[in-house]
Image (spheres, grey):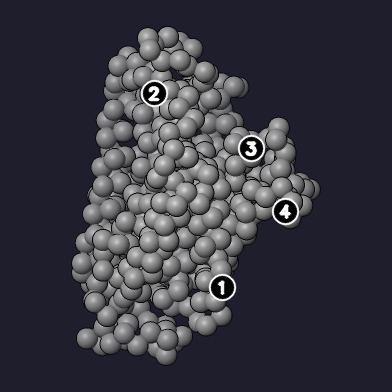
Amino acid sequence: MKAFRVFLFSWIVAQTFYFGIYGPDLLFLKQIRPHNVLFVLTLISFLLAWVGGKTVRSPMEWPERLLLLLGGILAASFFLGGAAFDETTSKKSLGTLLSFTLYPFSTYFFVRAIPFRREFLVSVLKVVCFLGIYLAFTGVFEHYEWLHWLVWPGYIMDPSLGTHFERSRGPFMESVAMGRVLAMVFACWLVLRLEAGPFLRKVAIVSIPVTMASVYFTATRGPWIGFALICLIFLVFKTPVRRTMCWLTVCIVIVAAFGLTNKFSLGQNNLFLERQTTVTDRVVTWLVSGRMVEANPLLGIGFGRFNVEWPNYYKEFQGFDFTGFDGSHNTFLTMAAEVGLPTFGLYLLMAFLMWRRCFRVYRQLDRGLTFERTFVVMVMGILLLYVFTGWFSDLRWNTLQNTLMFLMLGLVAAMERDLCNKAIVVGEDDLDQTPELVATYHH
């Protein structure tokens, strides 16, 4: 299992960066994409653990059945809809399919099959938080011109590459993905502090405000609202994080009330009242998506065909000053347009069942397991962030956010099996470090 953990964490880190035509120069690895190689190694190490009897068999429930069904439907649509054989869509759409289904869904099943240990959960949070340190400081370095020399890799500061230049976009090359991942990092820091030693607590004191600043510097409304949803979920549920979250909320309100920021305030200087052309463009795109759905309600136009089919369905809509098409900007309407309303409904059902499981686990966990309960609350908040921002942007393009989301959902599924059902697996290292787990285990 140690090999699996090493490859899994290395794979997650590799998903942060672009390779191929630009990105770090890693010789031949640049062309074959290191994260693809690391995925294969992760898969092999998991299969070896499975053959060696180190994994746990769990009955398939509806969330798992729906994941397999959705993966099969989207793959079939990719091939049968023609995107796989169209030179203009095949390569790009295949990458989207892998990022949205194979990679995250596989991660879910990998983690779900591993016996739950607090040590592994802490390791996951550490990886996300230390990766978040890099992302948070990079976002700050991007914002201040005199710190641009500290931004790495250099492709981040190339205005001809990616989108959202002059906002904090990090190695993802777009501010929406950057904001989503940073919001996840923020939540992970709040949970990790409960189990961290003195050194990590001091690091958290610096990293949490820097992460919040970097989220702000993305200057993107969707991640801001997603960040607010995470804050809200921590305020609603009773966990040790609630007190910290109250203080942070007070600070945010004070900053907004006194207009100390130029994009987020309670007055006229507010990003939500600016860039209205982007709102108009999205509405037009959604209306075109509706036309696609109306024409192909059951099977859709085919996975990966949205951009190609756009000219066939676009028309001018009265009252909307459309500036131009630059993508779907809506994961779910695009899904309905490409693979049909039934599949869209199945995806929403899967997300709801996952959230309901998290809520059930939170209620069933022993109250002494405060760390685990707080983690589950965090996952509920991140899932709200994931679904909400998916309505205003396309989740399918960034691998890391999808992998992290389903990795955490897989941890909750393993937690339900091994903690809620009292089938706890306690390793030698856990005996000294987690007395409440041992007490529950003996009970």
The answer to the question of whether label 1 and label 2 lie on touching residues, with beta carbons closer than 8 A, is no
The Cα–Cα distance between marks 4 and 2, rounded to whole angstroms, is 37 Å
- Residue 147's disc is 4
The picture places residue 34, in percent across and down from the top left corner, at 66, 50
The Cα–Cα distance between marks 1 and 2, rounded to whole angstroms, is 42 Å
Q: Would residue 261 be found to the left or right of residue 286 on screen? A: right
Q: Circle 3 sits on which residue?
A: 165
Q: Earlier in the sequence, mark 4 or mark 1?
A: 4
The Cα–Cα distance between marks 1 and 3, rounded to whole angstroms, is 29 Å
- Residue 203's disc is 1
Q: Is residue 226 above or below residue 53?
A: above
- Residue 292's disc is none
The Cα–Cα distance between marks 4 and 1, rounded to whole angstroms, is 21 Å
The picture places residue 396, in percent across and down from the top left corner, at 47, 38
- Amino acid on which disc 4 is placed: Leu
The Cα–Cα distance between marks 2 and 3, rounded to whole angstroms, is 23 Å
- Amino acid on which disc 2 is placed: Val
Q: Residue at x 30, y 62 (%)?
A: 235
Mark whose residue sits in front, 4 or 3: 4
Q: Is residue 391 shown to the viewer in this render?
A: yes
Q: Earlier in the sequence, mark 1 or mark 2?
A: 1
Q: Circle 2 sits on which residue?
A: 283
